[in-house]
Image (cartoon, rainbow, N blue to C red):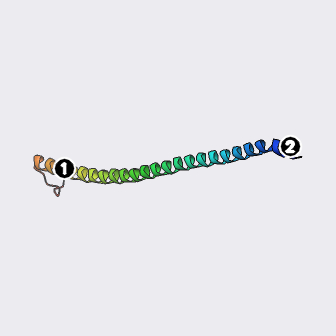
Amino acid sequence: MQYFALLALPFVLAGGLFSLTWYGVEQAVDWVRDRRQRRRRAIERELDRQQAQLRATILRLATELGADAHEARKALIRESYLASGRTPTEPE
């Protein structure tokens, strides 16, 4: 029985070493995976922020263009009346 314990000792030690190594590898893989997820979330947050900023810029520019177009239409109508010599209140 004493010889069996001596023969089994290297296998027990190797198994323990293998288990510890396996645990370490799992922890390293989990750490890398978590790091990638954190990085991905940070990039997505930045993209969402930029998207909201661009959306606000687009809406602001569209409003400004609409106001400019309205002023241009008013100026064109005014010039049309001045060129024809009529006023908007005269009936046809």
Percent x, y of residue 9:
78, 45
Q: Position of residue 89 (x, y in %)?
A: 17, 58
Seen at 18% across and 48% down, the residue is 76
Judge from the rendering whether residue 8 lies leftward or rightward of residue 90; answer left or right. right
Please, what secondary structure does the residue beneath circle 1 have? Answer: helix
Residue in view at x 25 percent, y 54 percent: 67
Question: Which residue is rendered at x = 20% and y = 49% of the image?
Answer: 72
Residue type marked 2: Tyr
Horizontal and vertical percent position of residue 13: 74, 45
- For this orientation, the residue located farthest to the right is 1
Q: Which residue is mark 2?
A: 3
Q: Amino acid at mark 1?
A: Ile
Local packing at callout 1 (Cα closer than 10 Å; few below 14, some 14-19, many 20+) is few
Residue 52 is marked as none
Q: Label 2: few (<14), some or many (≥20) within 10 Å?
A: few
Q: Is residue 75 left or right of residue 30?
A: left
Name the residue carrying label 1. 77
- Residue placed most toward the observer, 18 or 54: 18
Residue 60 to residue 22: above or below? below
Q: Earlier in the sequence, mark 1 or mark 2?
A: 2
Q: CA distance from mark 1 to mark 2?
A: 110 Å
